[in-house]
């Protein structure tokens, strides 16, 4: 079985700290919550990656479910993007730079209509 490597920016929920800057000064509790949520999403992403490594190590699963296994990569990419947005100092700006077009379109369309308080 292959070993999954943690990326260098991996953050455990306990490591989340309040940020500084104009956006954070007014609402440190919300910012800390977003950082902790980002860390939880990152943990889920790593769990999904570990699961995909195990499944890809099984030749029967690979031979019979290769298209489904490819979904794991898309899922982990989306989770990484969501975590990045949650921990960004400017979440609305972060949405503008999402590399996956489908996710970018869904999130951008919603933010343009509703102007959520991120």
Image (spheres, rainbow, N blue to C red):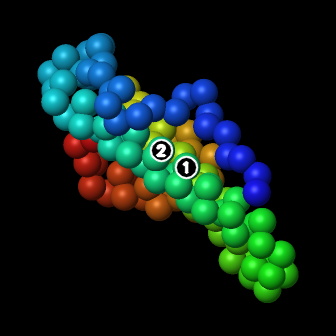
Q: Is residue 58 among the parts visible in the rendering?
A: yes
Left or right relative to 75: residue 36: left
The residue carrying mark 2 is 42
Which of the 4 quarters of the picture holds residue 40? top left
Residue at 37 percent of width and 58 percent of height = 110
Q: Is residue 108 among the parts visible in the rendering?
A: no
Image quarter of the N terminus: bottom right
Residue 37 at x, y = what percent? Answer: 33, 43
Residue at 40 percent of width and 39 percent of height = 39
Left or right relative to 22: residue 62: right
Image quarter of the C terminus: top left
The residue carrying mark 1 is 46
Quick check: marks 1 and 2 in contact, CB under 8 Å?
yes
Left or right relative to 118: residue 15: right
Residue 28 at x, y = what percent? Answer: 18, 24
Residue at 34 percent of width and 36 percent of height = 13
91, above or below 54, in the image: above
Secondary structure under tag 2 reads: helix
The residue at the far top in this view is: 21
Residue at 67 percent of width and 39 percent of height = 5
The residue at the far bottom in this view is: 64
Residue 108 at x, y = what percent? Answer: 45, 52
Residue 3 at x, y = what percent? Answer: 71, 47
Secondary structure under tag 1 reads: helix
């Amino acid at each position: 079985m292959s070993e999954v490597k943690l990326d260098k920016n991996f953050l455990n929920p306990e490591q989340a700290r309040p940020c500084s800057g104009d956006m954070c000064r007014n609402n440190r509790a919300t910012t800390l919550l977003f950082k902790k949520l980002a860390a939880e999403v990152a943990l889920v992403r790593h769990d999904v990656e570990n699961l995909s490594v195990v499944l890809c190590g099984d030749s029967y699963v690979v031979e019979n479910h290769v298209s489904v296994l490819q979904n794991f990569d898309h899922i982990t990419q989306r989770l990484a993007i969501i975590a990045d947005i949650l921990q960004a100092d400017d979440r609305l700006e972060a949405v503008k730079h999402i590399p996956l077009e489908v996710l970018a379109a869904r999130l951008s369309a919603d933010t343009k209509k509703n102007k959520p308080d991120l």
